[in-house]
Image (cartoon, helix red, strand yellow):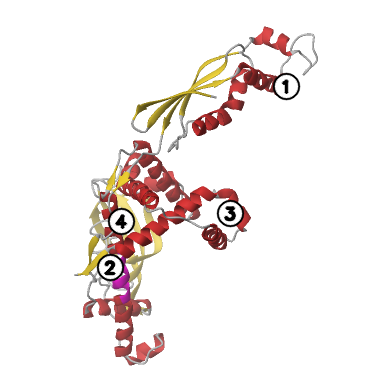
Amino acid sequence: MLKSKNQIETNKYELEIEVSPEVFEEAVQKAYLKNKSKINIPGFRPGKAPRKMIETQYGEGVFYEEAVNSIYGETIEEAVKEAELTLVAAPDVEVTDVGKDIGVKFKAVCITKPVVKVGDCKGIKVTKTVNAVTDDMVDHEIGHMRERQARSISVDDRPAQNGDDVIIDFDGYKDGKPFDGGKAEKYDLKLGSGQFIPGFEDQIVGHSVGDEFDVNVTFPEDYQAKELAGAPAVFKIKLHEIRMTEVPELDDDFVKDTTDFETVDELKADVRKHLEEHAEEHANADVEGAIMDAVIGKLEGEIPEVMYENKVNEMIDELSHRLSHQGIQLDMYLQFTNMTMDGLRETYREQAEKQVKLRLALEQYAVDEKIEVTDEELEEEYKKIGEQYQMPVETVKQYIHDDDLRQDIAVGKAVDQIKAAAVIENA
C-alpha cells in the first residue's frame, strides 16, 4: 500500500510503499513451494525438505528475492494508481527494508507527465506559398521519362568518352607486384561516375575497343586499405566493349509509343498539371507544419528530459525495424554511414522535441476545448486499424487500450479544429 507521496522536483515524486508482513509471507511461501524441489538437504528426498530446514541451512532470506520480485510489479502499479500519478517512464524503485516481521518497504522515484498550458490556438496566421511550375521543370520531368526509355548501344567506330559504359579487364600493381582486390575481368564501368579512384576513369577516355594500355594513379591518402593509402599504382587495362546510352527524341511518335497521349503538347500539359498538384500538396504540408510550429510556440510547461529520450528511442526502434526488413542490422547501418549511436541520437533530437511538445500541446488543447470522442467514433477507429493491419477488431483491442485510442482521436480532432480556424494568406 501507498504510505506517502512527496513531490521532490517539478514532475518528480517519491513514493514510500509498504507490503504487509502477511502478504510478504504468502509470497515467500509461494517461492518456497516453487523452488523446494531444486534444493537438496541431507536426509530429505528432493522436494521434501521443510521450509524451516531450508531457511536454517541457507539463511532466512533464501526466498526473499523471488518473493519480492513476484509482488513487485502489481505493488508498484497499485501504489502509482493510488497516488494518482501519470508516469512518462518506468519508476526508479529500490527495496529499503525487507523481513518477515516488517514485510517489504519500497521507495519509488516517479517522473510524471507535465502539467502544461497552451495559449489561444485559434486564428493562427500563416502564409501559403505555392511554387510556380516552370517550363524547365516540365522539361526536366519529361527528360526522366526519356531516360527511362533509353537503350544501350554497342559502339566500335569511336573512342570511349565520358558517359559511356565500358567493359574492361584490369590488373593492379604496386611496386611491380599485384595487390589484393586489384584485379577483375569483364568489369562494367560508367565513365565519369567517379566509381574508381581519381584519374582512373579519365585515362580510359580516348581508347578504343581492343586497346590494351596502362593507367597510372595514386591512391588517396585516406584510402580505406592502409597499405595502399597515398601509394602510386599501375593498372593494366584491356578494353572489351564500349556502350552508349541513346535517349529517344521527344516527338509525337515517342509520346504515342510510351504514354496515353497523342502529342508532345498534350504530354507537357499533363506533366505540368501533375507538377502543379504536387506543388499545391507541398504548400499545404508546409502550411500545416507552420501551424503546428505555432502551436508548439504557445506551449508553456517544464517537460521532463526522459520524454525526449523516450521519443528518440522510439525513432531508433522504428529505424531498426525498417532496416531489418531490408536485411540490415542497426550496427551495420551505423558502420555504413560512419555514425555512432550518440551521433544517431543527436540527429533525431530536434525532431523528438518537436513531436513531444506538439503532442502535449494538442492534448491540452483537446482538454481545454472539451473535445469528446463517442463510442461510435472509437469503434470506427478500431475497425480502420483492423482493416489496415488485416487483423480482427478484437485482436486490435488487445494491443491498444480504449483510453489511448480515444486520446489519439481527440488529438486528431484538435488538429482539424486548429487548421480550420487558421488564417491562411496566399503569398
Quick one: label 2 or label 1, which is nearer the N terminus?
Answer: 1
Residue drawn at x 31%, y 81% is 273
Q: Is residue 85 left or right of residue 305?
A: right
Quadrant of the rendered image containing residue 346: top left
Q: Identity of the amino acid at label 1?
A: Leu
Residue type (three-letter) at the residue carrying disc 3: Val
In front of the other: label 4 or label 2? 4
Q: Quadrant of residue 264?
A: bottom left
Residue linked to disc 4? 292
Q: Is residue 282 magenta?
A: yes
- Residue type at mark 2 is Ala
Instruction: Please tell me which of labels 4 and 3 falls first in the chain.
Output: 4
413 in the magenta segment? no
Q: Under tag 3, what secondary structure?
A: helix
Secondary structure of the residue carrying numbered label 1: helix
Query: In x, y percent, where is residue 178?
Result: 35, 50
Q: Examine the rendered structure and indicate whether residue 376 appears above or below residue 400.
A: below
| Mark drawn on residue 33 | 1
Q: What element carries label 4?
A: helix
Residue topped by disc 3: 396
Q: In this view, does 414 lie above or below 329?
A: below
The residue depicted at 23 percent of the width and 62 percent of the height is 126
C-alpha span from label 1 to label 3: 38 Å
- What percent of the width, then of the height, locates residue 390? 59, 61
Q: Residues within 10 Å of mark 4 (few under 14, many from 20)?
A: many
Give me the disc on residue 283: 2
